[in-house]
Amino acid sequence: MTTLICAGGSGTRVLEAVLHLCAAGLGPDVLRIFVIDPDGTNGNVTQTKTLVERYRACQEAFGEDLPLFRTKLDLMNGPQGLRVWNPVNGRQQFGALLNYQGLSEQQKDVAHLFFTQDELEMEMNVGFRGHPALGAAALSLMPLYKNDPLWSQLPQAINQEVIQGRTEVVIVGSVFGGTGASAIHPLVRYLRSLPQTNADNLKVAAVALVPYFRFSGDATAQNEEAKAQQAAQSEWFSLASRSAAEYYEHLREHKDWELDAMYWLGDDSPMQVKYSIGGPAQHNPSHFVDLLAGFAFLDFLKSPPQPGTCCYAGPQESSNDPGQNVLTWGDVPAPSDIVRENWYKALHRFHLVGAAHLGFYWPLLKDERLRTLPYCVPWYMDRFTNGSKLSTKDNQDRLEALSLYFRENYFPWWGQMHAAERDRVRLFNRRAWFTKDETLKIELNRLGNLIYPDTELHSLDPVDALFERTIQAGKSVQEGKFPSSTYLAILAQAAQSMVEQAARGEASH
């Protein structure tokens, strides 16, 4: 069993990346997930909750019959979907969490050695606001939460799993903010205390994000507001990251290192994001560091490094654009070139499936003329006009859920990452699914040019080639649980054939 604990806003955005990788068929069989964030109302958490529900709808509809969406999500019986755990009461001040008023005068003096009066009086309604010391103090009290449903379930599950075999836990968060920076080490120590037997079967990794964004706009006004609110300030991010690195190096030197691996990921050309102290207005766009963190997660599952290993990943300087750091497929952290190539193919296949479904097949399946002229689409007539009807409401609803995922989540997420004004992410060809005015529109004449860069050789030949392959796949793909899952299996097999052909450097004819 694999558990992914996402701490803070950055950790939550990494969860989005992991879910998209799972949708492409790269995740584990079952993935237990939850979020730790005192600011549970922030926009990124809300967005990720929606993505989780859309992923689950697709997993239930398609995951049993093909690799796509095969990872089942364990939400730890979260009654409201994705569980977001808050270590503090948002209505209280930090001092109340420490029971400051109940301390002796001597104990209060000790508290003042660690926390300022402003910090003790800080409201917890939008999290730790870039103060990791506050979060670390809150999370050090974790043993006291043993009656909390989340922290009673997780120890039981891990103790059972280490008896049966290996179980992995990955903690992801930034080290330059509040929640992520404060959560990693207390969580690692807590996890190491759980196994009652077979402790070596518990493998723990951390994915630590160093600065990859900064606040844009009127810096002076923002700094004044941040200071007034005791909030995070981007000019302190680098110093906070250095302090975190020194702290973990101190642990290594003094043999107090309890991680099997730690991944350090960042970008030395930070993206500018709109300033927000928290809440619904905090809605940062996707970034390639989120994706690298998702691949680091897969790397740990696929081939855990030697205990105590530190791994580093980020963009590299372009050979064609000196001074410009860009991300290419070769920068993806992976245990081997072969694994990286397989991941690349899986994502290319999934991208092709999504583009073909949204841009061609879904409109075709909704066309009323298909009901009277099914022989125009041989694979449809052979597989879906007799006993296995694709046109029933249940199957149409499943295909609409698939369309919603691609239209509202998958392609916009990749689009943000490949934002045209940056042109630093050189994985997919953004022009194949986004117009210059930021409108989602699948360009079918670029179906054979989904991978970066955009070329001038555009045609509809790849559409015809994919259609021919769906005819062949329609003859061999086994019947799925639903007609809709059979359809997706046919499309996935046809797309896989196209991707393998592209990898061999052959033309799509």
Image (cartoon, grey):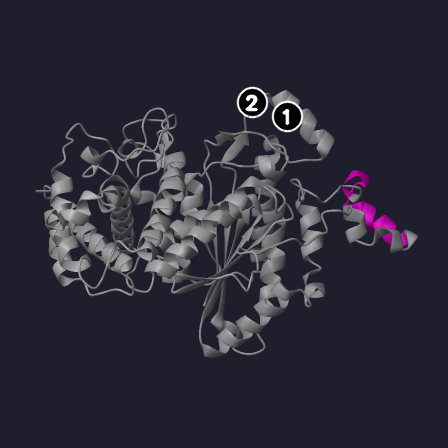
Dots 2 and 1: beta carbons under 8 Å? Answer: yes
Q: Amino acid at mark 1?
A: Gln
Which quadrant: the N terminus?
bottom left
Q: Please, what secondary structure does the residue beneath circle 1 have?
A: helix
Q: Earlier in the sequence, mark 2 or mark 1?
A: 2
Q: Which mark is residue 417?
A: none
In the image, what residue occupies the spot 28% across and 57% down?
A: 484
The residue closer to the viewer here, 132 or 438, is 438
Relative to 347, say whether 285 is above or below: above
Vertical side of 331 occupied by 307: above or below: below
Span colored in magenta? 106-119
Q: Which residue is mark 2?
A: 217
Q: Is residue 316 left or right of residue 79?
A: left
Element assignment for label 2: loop
Identify which amino acid the numbered label 2 is placed on: Gly
Whether 345 is among the magenta residues is no
Residue 475 in the image: state x and y as whole percent: 12, 60
Residue denoted by label 1: 222
Q: Position of residue 56 (x, y in %)?
A: 43, 57
